[in-house]
Image: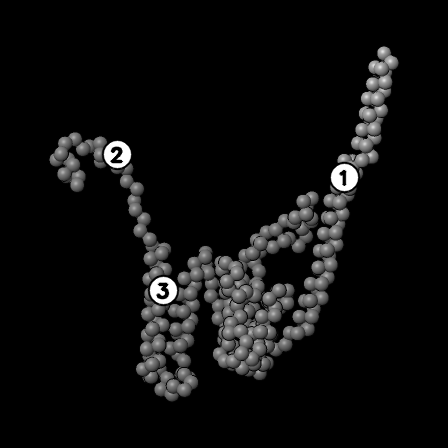
Amino acid sequence: TESKHRRRGGDLKTRSTELGSAVTGSPLTSVLPASTTVKKSIVLSSETREELAKQAKVTKENRRAQIDERHKYLISRLADGIGLSEEQVEEAIISDDKFHLIEQFFAASGLKKLLFFYQDVLQQESNASLRSDGSTSSLLQKKLFITMGYAENFTGTCAFFLRTSDKVITASNVSQEVNFGIFGCTNGNILQGLEFFLSQIMIPALKSQQNWGAVKEGLKNSHIQDFLYSVDKFVDTLSSSRQNIEDKIQLTKVDIDIYVSNLQNPSDYIAAG
């Protein structure tokens, strides 16, 4: 009996020790800080977002201070072509992480083109609150942004600026050295947008142009005529390709059982053939 009491006492002591370690040891302490850590990480995430917002605001104001007549020329063309106010375009440009491409476009021997897309993109709601998992809600919204043309899918409107020389772009020559154009991608149909741009805008403009630089004869020159003819042929080919894609052959589904069930003898098969 004494030995049994000792064993039970020993078991009770062991269980007491295990219970104490369960209360004061790592399992419990690892649970409590976990929830605290989650809350802390959300708070830190919120603080980080606020800090990033402050930095973005400073960056935007610094860029706004850099806006000169060259930028204003681009902004006015974009506003007219896309249908936004100049204030909206300016805000979009100074908020863009590719703002530096504009300076590269203005520089001597700089970028040959400057592209803008205006289309639906997933954006975080301005009044969105942080969810328990740290994510935020987002929705499709129209956005104007600078692009290199290969990282994003083109689904809306493309506005572009092209340089005509390697000169540095200044406030005095920007209207002469930079050409502006725009075309759409209705329902994702880029061929239709390109065809419309070439046939309705570019070709009429070329055929009405009087000054062809060193070519004094202008439209009477055989090389100019060959060039315009080749552009016309390209648009025709583009149109034909688009129609072939859109008007692809659709085979009608036929209920073959109706015809097969009536075949009774070899003459029926020959007639059907």
Q: Residue 27 location, x and y as percent?
A: 76, 35
The vertical placement of 233 against 241, above or below, is below
Classed neighbour count for the residue bearing mark 3: other residues with Cα under 10 Å, few (<14), some (14–19), many (≥20): some
Residue found at x 47% / y 63% = 184
The vertical placement of 227 against 124, above or below, is below
| Residue 255 appears left or right of 130 | left
| Residue 267 image-quadrant placement | top left
Nearest the viewer among 224 and 105 is 105
The vertical placement of 173 against 88, above or below, is below
Q: Disc 3 marks which residue?
A: 238
Tell me, for residue 249, which label it has, or none.
Answer: none
Disc 3 on helix, strand or loop? helix
Classed neighbour count for the residue bearing mark 1: other residues with Cα under 10 Å, few (<14), some (14–19), many (≥20): few
Disc 1 on helix, strand or loop? helix
Q: Disc 1 marks which residue?
A: 30
Q: Are marks 2 and 3 in contact (CB under 8 Å)?
A: no
Name the quarter where the N terminus is drawn.
Answer: top right
Q: CA distance from mark 2 to mark 1?
A: 71 Å
Q: Earlier in the sequence, mark 2 or mark 3?
A: 3
| Residue 51 image-quadrant placement | bottom right
Is residue 248 visible in this depiction of the protein? yes
